[in-house]
Image (cartoon, helix red, strand yellow):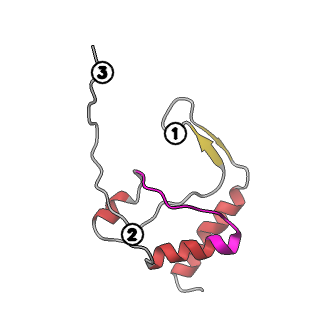
Amino acid sequence: MAGRVKEIGSRPGGGLLEGAPLLECIRAVDAHLGIRSHLDCSSTDANVPLSLGLAAVSIGAGGQGGGAHTPAEWFKPERRELGLQRVLLALCMLLGGE
């Protein structure tokens, strides 16, 4: 018997336009810190504000991980300080401390 898929949740979607100020801020911080980032679509905490027309992103805060949402989930905090610098610099820029 074939398995069935049962929906257990429904998250709204959304996105930022190319050139959105929030996106440009993150890109500027990444360039300053030498972080090679990329855009991707996923189910994140940014879904709800994006669906309401609010600018939002979900960014990593350093470290490496895998096996998300499974019993085998893991995290290594290596280079965590770079991720925390990223968050702090972006916050300062967004609050007008450019």
Q: Position of residue 84 (x, y in %)?
A: 65, 63
The tag earlier along the polypeptide, 3 or 1, is 3
Gap between marks 1 and 2 measured at Cα: 25 Å
Q: CA distance from mark 3 to mark 2?
A: 36 Å
Q: Compare marks 3 and 2 and give the one earlier in the sequence.
A: 3
Describe the element under mark 2 as helix, strand or loop. loop
Main structural element of the magenta stretch: helix, strand or loop? loop
Question: Which image quadrant for residue 57?
Answer: bottom left
User: In the image, what residue occupies the spot 55% across and 36% down?
Assistant: 67
Label ID, residue 16:
2
Lateral position of residue 7 relative to residue 29, left or right: left
Q: Position of residue 82 (x, y in %)?
A: 70, 62
| Image quadrant in which the C terminus is located | bottom right
In the image, which is nearer the foreground, mark 1 or mark 2? Answer: 2
Dot 2: within a 10 Å radius of its alpha carbon, few (fewer than 14), some, or many (20 or more) residues?
A: some
Residue pictured at 58% horizontal, 79% vertical:
92
Q: Which residue is mark 1?
A: 68
Circle 3 or circle 1, nearest the eye? 3
In the image, what residue type sits under mark 3? Answer: Gly
72, above or below 68, in the image: above
* Kind of residue at badge 2: Leu
Quadrant, the N terminus = top left
Pointer 3 residue = 3
Q: Three-letter amino acid code at disc 1?
A: Ala
